[in-house]
């Protein structure tokens, strides 16, 4: 069933002007047009719009969203799961903010000065410098420059989303290993592809060649091996094998 631009605007709660802009910038173009030249959106177009709107809610810029959705390796199901992880992270943060606000309201109503440490602790669990140090250790040259360029503008929420996504991928690798799934199975290679796209989306263009280079580092650099071993014994080698298998499947 085809929908006109006004019908899609009403369904999605966006303006017709917004849909026209998405079409103009190549983010969401209708699959067909009527004989009179009017835009007609089909179900696959609505699925793409669905992802666009979620990613916008998560703070992604339009060009970043287009890059994600147009990637040949884009996996809609994996992407939706990643979005769910990021949104859950935002929900948890908002709940902590509510608790802090309730404490501030109670302190004000009772005329008791709020403890200064408690006043700001909800904002104090994030230090971007930790991640800058990780970038310094992992990458150099053009990749490091690109990573710095992107991350320099990240908000606290974007950093948290990136780290939550990374943690979710690692947890899925660990769960697959515990379940006995082969590193070169379709399911585990799909996790490896999510891992590659997560780096590509948040830090720098991550080709299959670069990805396999990272995989080698995971098993040759004791720091990174230890990082993955904290989650599951043998996980670094397992991720290495999955990344290599995924790259071979893609011809990379």
Image (cartoon, helix red, strand yellow):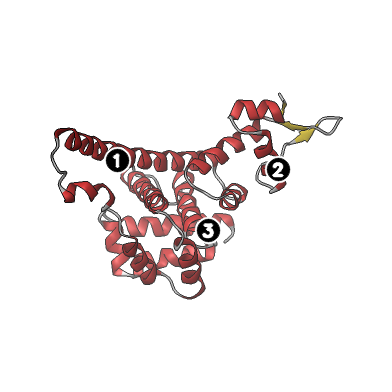
Residue sitting farthest toward the bottom:
141
Badges 2 and 1: C-beta atoms under 8 Å apart? Answer: no
Q: Nearer the viewer, residue 2 or 215?
A: 2
Task: Answer yes or no: is residue 132 visible.
Answer: yes
The mark nearer the N terminus, 2 or 1, is: 2
- Using the numbered discs, state the Cα–Cα distance from disc 2 to disc 1 in whole angstroms: 37 Å
Of marks 2 and 1, the one in the foreground:
1
From the viewer's perspective, tell me whether residue 85 is left or right of residue 1: left
Label 3 sits on a secondary structure element that is helix
Label 1 sits on a secondary structure element that is helix
Q: Nearer the viewer, residue 223 or 35?
A: 35
For label 2, the residue is 23
- Using the numbered discs, state the Cα–Cα distance from disc 3 to disc 1 in whole angstroms: 42 Å
Task: Answer yes or no: is residue 232 visible.
Answer: no
Q: Residue at x 59, y 46 (%)?
A: 69
For label 1, the residue is 97
Q: Quadrant of residue 105?
A: top left
For label 3, the residue is 247
Which quadrant: the C terminus?
A: bottom right
């Amino acid at each position: 069933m085809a929908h006109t631009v006004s019908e899609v605007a009403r369904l999605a709660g966006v303006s017709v002007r917004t849909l026209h802009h998405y079409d103009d910038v190549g983010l969401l173009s209708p699959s067909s047009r009527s004989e009179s030249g009017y835009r007609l959106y089909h179900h696959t177009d609505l699925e793409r719009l669905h992802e666009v709107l979620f990613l916008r809610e998560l703070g992604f810029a339009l060009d970043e969203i287009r890059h994600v959705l147009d990637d040949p390796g884009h996996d809609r199901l994996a992407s939706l799961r990643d979005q769910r992880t990021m949104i859950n992270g935002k929900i948890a943060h908002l709940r902590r903010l509510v608790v802090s606000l309730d404490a501030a309201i109670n302190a004000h109503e009772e005329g008791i000065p709020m403890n200064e440490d408690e006043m700001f602790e909800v904002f104090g669990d994030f230090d971007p410098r930790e991640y800058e140090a990780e970038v310094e250790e992992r990458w150099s040259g053009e990749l490091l420059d690109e990573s710095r360029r992107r991350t320099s503008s990240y908000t606290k929420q974007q950093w948290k989303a990136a780290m939550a996504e990374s943690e979710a991928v690692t947890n899925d690798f660990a769960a697959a290993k515990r379940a006995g799934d082969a590193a070169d199975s379709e399911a585990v290679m799909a996790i490896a592809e999510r891992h590659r796209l997560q780096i590509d989306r948040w830090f720098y263009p991550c080709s299959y060649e670069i990805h396999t280079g990272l995989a080698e580092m995971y098993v040759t650099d004791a720091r990174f091996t230890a990082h993955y071993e904290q989650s599951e014994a043998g996980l670094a080698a397992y991720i290495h094998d999955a990344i290599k298998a995924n790259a071979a499947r893609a011809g990379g």
